[in-house]
Amino acid sequence: MTVTVGDATLNVTGFTVSSEFVGPEWYKWENQTLKRKKTVYGRKRTWTLECIEKDVAWADSDAKYLEEQGAQGNILSFTCDLGNRYQISNIDIYIDSVEITMEQVGSQNIRHFTVTLKET
C-alpha cells in the first residue's frame, strides 16, 4: 500500500472515501406526485486517512507537514495505490483537517493522526 500527499508518504491504517454529487436539486409536481429532481454537474471526493508514525521527531513528522500545508491553503497532489482495492493518481487536493492523538505509551514516540483531504 502506497499513499502520498504532497511530499509525505503516509503509513495508513484506515481509509475512507466519500463522493458528493454536486448540482442543484428541486421539487416538481409531476403526475399528481411530488418528485425530487437533480442535475449533477460533477463529483467531489473527500478522503479520510488514519495514519500512524513511530519514532519520528516532531520536526520530521508527516502530521506536522500536513498541518502546515493545510494552514497555508496549499494544493497538493494525492496518490493512493491499495492494489485491487482502490487506486488513484495525482489528484489535486487541499487538506481540510488534521487531528493528532499522542497516547502515553511509556517512553515510546507513537503518533496517530487523521487527515481529511478534499478534492479541488
Image (spheres, grey):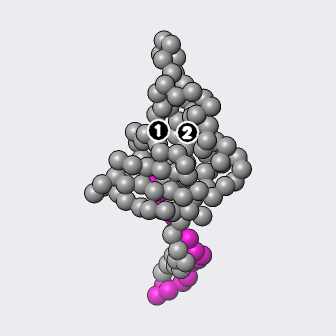
Q: What element carries label 2?
A: helix
In the picture as drawn, the residue positioned furthest to the left comes out as 84
In the image, taking residue 100 as reference, residue 90 lies left or right, namely: left
Residue 81: numbered disc: none
Magenta-highlighted residues: 16-32
Residue at mark 2 to residue at mark 1: CA–CA distance: 9 Å
- Residues at marks 2 and 1 touching, judged by CB atoms closer than 8 Å: yes
Q: Is residue 119 at least partly visible in the picture?
A: no
Residue 32 locus on image (x, y percent): 48, 85
* Viewer-nearest residue: 37 or 84: 84
Q: Name the residue under label 1.
A: 51
Q: Is residue 87 at least partly visible in the picture?
A: yes
Residue at figure coordinates x 39%, y 49% from the top left: 2
Q: Name the residue under label 2.
A: 62
User: Is residue 26 shown in magenta?
Assistant: yes
Residue at figure coordinates x 59%, y 56% from the top left: 76
First in sequence: mark 2 or mark 1? 1
Amino acid type of the residue that numbered disc 2 sits on in the rendered structure = Asp
Residue at figure coordinates x 52%, y 51% from the top left: 5
